[in-house]
Amino acid sequence: MVATAFPAASEAALWAFRAGGSAIDAAVAAAWALAVCEPGASGLGGQTVALVRLASGRTLAVDGHSRAPAAASKLSVRRVEQRLGYRACTVPTTPAVLAALQRRHCRLPLATLLEPAIRLAAGGYRLTPLQHRQLRWCEAGLLATPAASRFRQRSGRLYAAGDVFRQPRLADALRRIARHDTDDFYRGAIAQAIAGDMRARGGLLDEADLAAVREPDEREPVTVGYRGRRVLTVPPLGGGIELLLALKLLERLGPDGAPDAAASWSARLADVVHTTFAERERQPAHPDDWAPALGDRLLGDERAVELAGRLSAARPVAAGAGREEPGETTHLCTADAEGNVVSLTQSIQSLFGAKVANDRYGFLYNNYLTTCPRRPHRYRLDGRCRARSNAAPALVLAPEGGSMRPALVLGAAGSRRIVSSMLHVVAGVLDRRLELGDAVAGPRVHARLSGRVWVERPAATAATTWGRCRPSRSRPTARWSAPPTPVATAPRSPWTGGRPRAPGGPGRWRRPRTPRTPRASDGRSTRCGGRRCTGCCCCRWRSWWPSGRRCRARRSCSGASRC
C-alpha cells in the first residue's frame, strides 16, 4: 500500500516494492522523490519525521526535528528575517533521516532508492494546477533572488500547469549523495556550497552547524486508548501530544457512535482543537524534559476530565498567544504484507520555505525559525534552539485475533491544521462510522488560537457559522474578522472565517481585513497602493492603509506622504 501527495512519488514507492524492497524502502524512495516534485512543501533543505512499525511489532518514532544555527539569536535575526531570507533557515535534517532509515531498516542500497528522484529531477515532471497556483501566490518572494527564480522560464513567465519542470542542479546534488552518502551534504562539497552561499548572502548557517548533525534518535512513541483502539504518534517536538489530547477530550465529550448532526460535531471538534492548542501554549512540552511521567501527566485522565468539564461548562480556556505560524507540509504512508508500516511527514515549514534557494544545487531552504518565539518561552529563539513542529504521523491499532494490528496509518499537511485534519479522519471513522474515503474527503473546521474558526464551505451551514457558539469557549481575541454571513467568499481558498457572537446579542462585527501587500525576501512591501513603498511603519511591517488612517500598531503613518 502506498499513499503520497504526488503521483510520481507513488510511482517511486511502487518501483522500490518491485525491486524487492519493504514498506520502509518504499517510503524512503517516495520521500526522496517528494523532495523533487513537491518543492513548495519539502526538499533537501527541510526536515523529516517518521513513525515506523516493524514486522516484529515494535514501533519507532524517528526524530528528525531541526535546530537553529549556533549564531541565531534575537540580536542576529530580526523578526521579519525569521520568515523570509537566508537567516530564517535551521539546519536541514531530511537527508540525515532518510539515510538513517535506509541504513537501519532497508534492504535496498541508498543509490538504488535515489534513482527515481534523480530521474525526476533530471527529466522533469509536469506541474499540477495547484503547484501553478502556489507559484503565483509566492511569485514576488521567489523571484526576488536569482537562485529561486528558476521557477520562471527563459521567456520570463512562470511555469504553468502541464509544463515540464526540470531541476538539473538538484539532480547533481542527488547524484553526489548517491555516490558519497549524506556525509557529502553535511561535511563534503554540498556542505561547502551551503556554507559559502550563506556567507555570501548574510545567512547564519555554517560548516560547524552542518557537521554537528548526527543520525536521528529513534524514540518510543506516545500512545493513548481511544474507543477500544490504541493510537500511536510521535513525542514532542511534533504535534502528537496535541492529537492524543484532542482524542481524549472527544472521548469524554461524546459517547461512542453518537448520532450527532454534522453541525454539532463540527462545533465540538472546533472547541477541542482550540482547547488543545491553548493548552500547548500554556504548558509546552520540550524533548529535553520528556519522560514517561510527563507524558502520563499531559495525557492523563485527570487532565482530560478537567478540560472536558471546562468545555462542557463553557468556561474559558485561555490561550498563551494569539499568533499561529504558517506552514506547508507533505506526507506519505506505506505498508506491506509482512507488517511493516511507515507514516512519514517532511516539510520546509512555509510554502516554498524561506523563498530562497541554494545557488549551486537549487534546493530551497526552510524557514523553521518562524516557529521560535521571541518572547520568554521554552522554545524561544536562541543558538541551537529546537524548532517547533506540528508533524504528527500516526498509527491506529485495533484488536484482531488476540493482538493489536494496524487499522489506520495516517498523517496530514498544513502546520496546525495537521492535528485538526487528522482528528476529523480518526473521529469520523471510529465515532461516526464513516468509510475512510468519506472521512478524508469530508469538509473540515479549524479553530485558531486567535478565536477565528475556519470552515470549509460545505460545512459552513447556519449552525456552524458560530452564531450559536459561546465566546467563552472560542475565546475571540482577533480585532478584525469577516462579516457574519453563513458563507463568506474567500478568493482562491476553500476556507472561510467567522467570529462568535455574544450570547443573546447580534455581536459586534468589524470590516474585513485589508489584503496584505506582496513582500520581497527582506520583508519589505513591494507595492503600496500601486506606488513604491516609502517604508513607513505600517507599510514596512503590516498591510497598507489609505492616507489618514492609523496602522495596526496604533501609530500614525509619520513621514510617509504616499501613504
Image: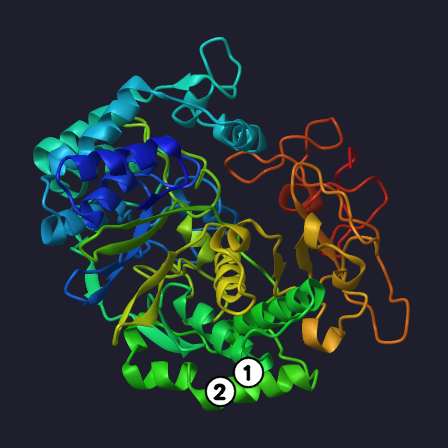
Q: Which amino acid type is marked by label 2?
A: Arg
Q: CA distance from mark 2 to mark 1?
A: 11 Å
Q: How is the image coloured?
A: rainbow
Image mark for residue 368: none
Viewer can see residue 448: yes
Element carrying mark 1: helix
Residue found farthest to the front: 401
Query: Picture coordinates of residue 283 (x, y %)?
Result: 47, 78
Viewer can see residue 206: no
Q: Residue at x 68, y 63 (%)?
A: 262
Q: Which amino acid type is marked by label 1?
A: Arg
What residue would you read off at disc 1? 252
| Viewer-side residue, 83 vs 442 | 442
| Viewer-side residue, 268 vs 77 | 268
In the image: residue 105, left or right of residue 258: left
Nearest to viewer (mark 2 / mark 1): 1
In the image: residue 312, left or right of residue 100: right
Dot 1 alpha-carbon crowd within 10 angstroms: few under 14, some 14 to 19, many 20 or more: some
Dot 2 alpha-carbon crowd within 10 angstroms: few under 14, some 14 to 19, many 20 or more: some
In the image: residue 432, left or right of residue 82: right
Is the residue 133 above or below the residue 375 in the image?
above
What residue would you read off at disc 2? 303
Residue found farthest to the top: 155
Nearer the N terminus, badge 2 or badge 1?
1
Element carrying mark 2: helix
Query: Picture coordinates of residue 415 (x, y %)?
Result: 48, 54
